Amino acid sequence: MNAVSLKAICAASVFYGVLLTLMPEGKEKRIASMCVTAALTLMLLGLCRSLGWESYAVSLAEAASASETIASDAETQRRELNRLVIERACEEYIMDKAAELSLHIHSVSVSARWSREEVWVPERVKIALAADGDGRERLSSLIEAELGIPERMQEWNLEGTEG
């Protein structure tokens, strides 16, 4: 909108408001009120005509596109955050179970995949053991039973070496 035209309409509205307040009641005031209303309406219509409707439509389309992009990015970030939360929860579960089985673990890394049910599912685990212990087979079974990660998707390393 043109700021000058908008200021002119506001000034005219104030002036007409004061003028109508000072006029005595009667037929003349009603006629003046109709004239003021018509004049302000014409001023507003003139201002609307001067708007660039083409640029408004383009701006509106750009805003809608930007909104869709932001919503899509937010959904992607939310999905990735959910993946990280699930992976960390699985890693904590494995560390807790290893401690219960007296296994000393250096690190655990769980990878999740996006399933057809549209949820993150733990898919693979890498475990670095400080020392091989009796509880390794039991922990492997628990990981498969509780987290659904089959033994073939479990990678066990002894003190950080490949194995």
Image (spheres, rainbow, N blue to C red):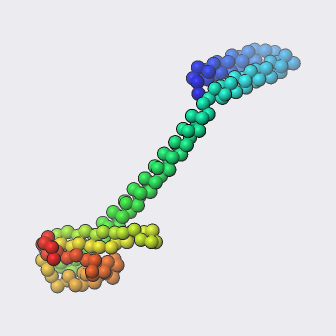
Where residue 33 sits, quadrant-wise, is top right
- Picture coordinates of residue 51, whole percent (x, y): 62, 29
Q: Which residue is drawn at 65% across and 21% down?
A: 9
Of the 4 image quadrants, the one containing the N terminus is top right
Q: Which residue is drawn at 23% across and 70% down?
A: 108
- Picture coordinates of residue 31, whole percent (x, y): 83, 19
Where residue 101 sits, quadrant-wise, is bottom left
Of the 4 image quadrants, the one containing the C terminus is bottom left
In the image shown, does 55 or 134 lie closer to the viewer?
Answer: 55
Answer whether residue 93 is visible to the viewer in this image: no
- 77 lies above or below 19: below
In the image shown, does 96 or 128 lie closer to the viewer?
Answer: 128
In the image shown, does 40 or 163 lie closer to the viewer?
Answer: 163
- Picture coordinates of residue 22, whole percent (x, y): 75, 14
Residue 27 lies left or right of residue 80; in this view the side is right
Counting labels gives: 0
- 142 lies above or below 128: below
Residue 134 lies left or right of residue 74; in this view the side is left
Judged from this view, the residue extending furthest toward the right is: 27
Where residue 52 sits, quadrant-wise, is top right
- Picture coordinates of residue 133, whole percent (x, y): 15, 82
Judged from this view, the residue extending furthest toward the front is: 54
Answer whether residue 73 is visible to the viewer in this image: yes
Residue 75 lies left or right of residue 133; in this view the side is right
Q: Residue at x 15, y 73 (%)?
A: 162
Q: Residue at x 17, y 85 (%)?
A: 134
